[in-house]
Structures are given as C-alpha cells and as structure tokens.
Amino acid sequence: MSGDRHPLFMPLILVGGLIFGFGLGFSQMARPEVVLHFLQFEDFGLLFVMFGAAIVSGIAFAVMPRLRDSAPLTGDRYERRLKPFDRNVLIGGALFGVGWGLSGICPGAAYASLGIGNVSILWALAGMFAGAYLQGAWRSKRAAADTAPAGAD
C-alpha cells in the first residue's frame, strides 16, 4: 500500500463503513434470523443483496482500471492480486461457513447488528476475535519453525 495517502482516505473509509452498516441495518440483513432463514432456503432476500453487491463490484473492477491508472485516494495501481487456492483457503472457508451458519451473522454484519441493538452478538464477535488471534499465533509459530536453523554442525 502507498504511504502517501490522501488526507480524506480515513474519513471516507469511516463514512463508507457507516453507510454500509446503515444499509445492512435498514435492509434487515444484520438480523441473524434473516441469515438463518436464507441458509434454510426459506427467504432469498439475502441472495438478492449478495448478487447486487457482486454486480456492482464486478462493474467497478471492470470499469475503473480503464478510467484511471491508480486509486484516487491511495495512489495504488489497479491490479489483480491472485492468491493460491490451497488447503488454508479450504479450511478458512469451511470455518467461516460453519461460524456463519451457527451464529447467523458474518463479521461485517456483526458490527451492524450491534448497532441495531443485538447485544448477544458480542459472543459471536468474541469468537471471531479469538479465532483470528489463534490463527495469527499459529501462523507466527509455524513461520518461526520454518525459518529456525536446523541445528549446529
């Protein structure tokens, strides 16, 4: 990332997050019951929200590199950053899906759910933070083991 960001970068991120959270709350997508009804094939409103977001994102990713060489607030060049599809992606996706199904909420919507008064979502947020911490500690330990000297010769 670029170190010389535009001064409005952080305020615009905050405003964007507030608008996103308001949209989730207003559309009822921050309610775990709505998500669980979607996962049980009873209500497909969330599917339309996700398709709408995918369409807008797809258009933005296709059009913006043709209009500009770099992002206006960060100066970073528009480019694809492909990551390998490996065991970590499968395990992470499975854990995310199980957590989503059990709690009825994904990480972004969990904060919006707090904003609409769902205090019990704090348990799910605590689980998300604990899982992220444990994953980071495990990766750090694994990286340190991979770079440790093999022993004295």
Image (cartoon, rainbow, N blue to C red):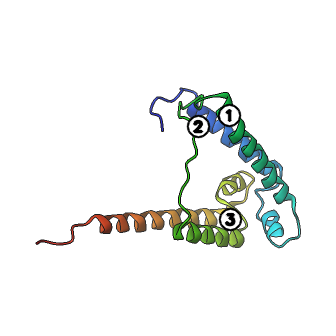
Q: Which mark is residue 118?
A: none
Q: Amino acid at mark 1?
A: Met
Secondary structure beneath label 3: helix
Whole-angstrom CA distance, mark 3 to mark 2, is 40 Å
Which residue is drawn at the image coordinates 77% and 43% (left, top)? 56
User: Is 143 left or right of 51, judged from the image as shown?
Assistant: left
Q: Relative to 80, does residue 32 appear above or below in the rendering?
A: below
Q: State the image coordinates of residue 53 (x, y, percent, origin top left).
A: 76, 48
* Chain-order first, disc 1 or disc 3: 1
User: Is 113 left or right of 82, judged from the image as shown?
Assistant: right
Q: Which residue is mark 3?
A: 120
Which residue is drawn at the image coordinates 53% and 60% (left, top)? 84
Query: Do the residues under discs 3 and 2 have CB atoms within 8 angstroms?
Result: no
Q: Amino acid at mark 3?
A: Ser
Q: Relative to 140, does residue 115 appear above or below in the rendering?
A: above
User: In terms of image quadrants, where is residue 14?
Assistant: top right
Secondary structure beneath label 1: helix
Q: Relative to 149, does residue 15 appear above or below in the rendering?
A: above
Looking at the image, which is closer to me, 115 or 34? 34
Q: Quadrant of the C terminus?
A: bottom left
* Chain-order first, disc 3 or disc 2: 2
Q: Which residue is mark 2?
A: 78
Q: Amino acid at mark 2?
A: Tyr
Which of the two discs, 1 and 3, sits closer to the camera? Answer: 1
Q: State the image coordinates of residue 29 (x, y, percent, origin top left).
A: 79, 56
Which of the two discs, 3 and 2, sits closer to the camera? Answer: 2
Label 1: how many Cα within 10 Å (few below 14, some 14–19, many 20+): few
Secondary structure beneath label 2: loop
* Chain-order first, disc 2 or disc 1: 1
User: Is 104 left or right of 152, judged from the image as shown?
Assistant: right
Q: Which residue is mark 1?
A: 64
